[in-house]
Image: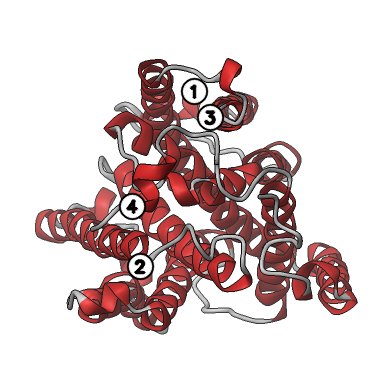
Amino acid sequence: MRPESPLFGDPMTRSPLPKLVACLAAGGLVVGFAVEPQRAWAALYCAALFALSTSLFGAVFVALANICGGTWHVAFRRVPEAMSSGIAPFGVVVVALLAWRTLAGGTAWHPPDEPGTLWFKAWWLQPTFMVARSVGYVAVWMIGATWLRSVSLAEDVRESRRSISHVQRGSAVFAALFAVTFSLAAADWLMALEPTWYSTVWGIYWFSGLMTGGLATLILLALSLRDAGPLRQAFTDEHLHDLGKLLFGFCCFWMYIWYCQYMLIWYAHLPEETMYFVPRLTGAWSVVFIVNVGLNWGLPFLLLLPRTSKRNPTLLRRVAVVVLVGRAVDLYLAAYPEVVGPYLIVGALELAAAFLIAFVAWSLWSRSFSSAPAVPAGSPLLRESLEYHA
């Protein structure tokens, strides 16, 4: 059935107060770009990257579930599909901010006069080429997400239903393209903020973050929709249990990749590698560095270790919030020392950017979810999903 109200009900989408605060936040960012352009840029950039990666997770989750032949997710599949509606708008914001910094901002990188392979970085990081590649990344993700959504909606019309093997093949193509484009985007959009530094696990590191942040968001949305009514009969504790297990697993995976990156750089102690970590282990940043590990792995690991905790909606909500805060801290830690400087800053600009992007994401996901039946009743796999036991 089609939900009668937007995602989470009326308060966020119909109440005038959030809209007023969002307008004030937008105005504050405009002032921030005039007064502190680098800080305002970093605040909006981090928030937009956060929303883009969370939206991208929706398409990746559906594609991976299709490839694996899974049926357990079908009952709540419209939630990640709705999340993927943010790929295009937030992708445009990220590319526009990147273009503003590299093309209009005059921050193009020029390699030092040293022998070696820096000539390739100088060519690869040309502003026009970088922006053009970024447009390509977003276009690939948008096309893939649109196709996955159209295939899902077509199941409601029996004559338009695609075969399972066809959906699996298409999902596999999207997953392969995603793996390449996302790895390159992670390097272009974050690692290139410090052009002379490099890490060979950077792409998989941010993929693990995309999965933890996306799973945390999916848990919050699905639980809220179950409480509100649209998924009351569809989203069960069995589904919640599997999402909790996935969140637990990917938090551990994030920590594994984090440790591999940090330990090898610490052990080798090469200046061209340690340049990323030294500023982040100095002064107040060292506290953020430790907090980042605690939020993204420490607390989720301890809280989700018991089986019962993965079936506890209240506890899972709290863990999901912790993980989302951890994702924000991780992005902040990656971008701010390079863009803003060595000083730890959290204030009105950061809060304004976070609220504005969150409001836009909420509105987009709500509209997308409300535009289709809450449960894919035409799917031949729905019955198996509803009867699923973890």
Q: Are marks 1 and 2 in contact (CB under 8 Å)?
A: no
The three-letter code of the residue at mark 4 reads Glu
Labels 1, 2: front one = 2
Q: Is residue 109 above or below residue 272?
A: above
Q: In front: 46, or 71?
A: 71
Q: Which residue is mark 2?
A: 237
Q: Residues within 10 Å of mark 4 (few under 14, many from 20)?
A: few
Taking the spot 43% from the left edge, 42% from the top edge, the residue there is 382
Q: Which residue is mark 3?
A: 148
Choose the circle earlier in sequence order: 3 or 1.
Answer: 1
Choose the circle earlier in sequence order: 2 or 3.
Answer: 3
Residue 325, disc? none
The three-letter code of the residue at mark 3 reads Leu
The three-letter code of the residue at mark 2 reads Asp
Q: Residues within 10 Å of mark 1 (few under 14, many from 20)?
A: some
Taking the spot 40% from the left edge, 44% from the top edge, the residue there is 383
The three-letter code of the residue at mark 1 reads Trp
Alpha-carbon span between mark 1 and mark 2: 52 Å
Choose the circle earlier in sequence order: 1 or 2.
Answer: 1
Choose the circle earlier in sequence order: 4 or 1.
Answer: 1
Q: Is residue 92 above or below residue 328?
A: above
Q: Residues within 10 Å of mark 3 (few under 14, many from 20)?
A: many
Q: Which residue is mark 4?
A: 387
Task: Give x and y (percent) for residue 310.
Answer: 28, 72
Q: Are marks 4 and 1 in contact (CB under 8 Å)?
A: no
Task: Give x and y (percent) for residue 185.
Answer: 48, 37
Choose the circle earlier in sequence order: 4 or 3.
Answer: 3
Labels 2, 3: front one = 2
Alpha-carbon span between mark 4 and mark 3: 24 Å
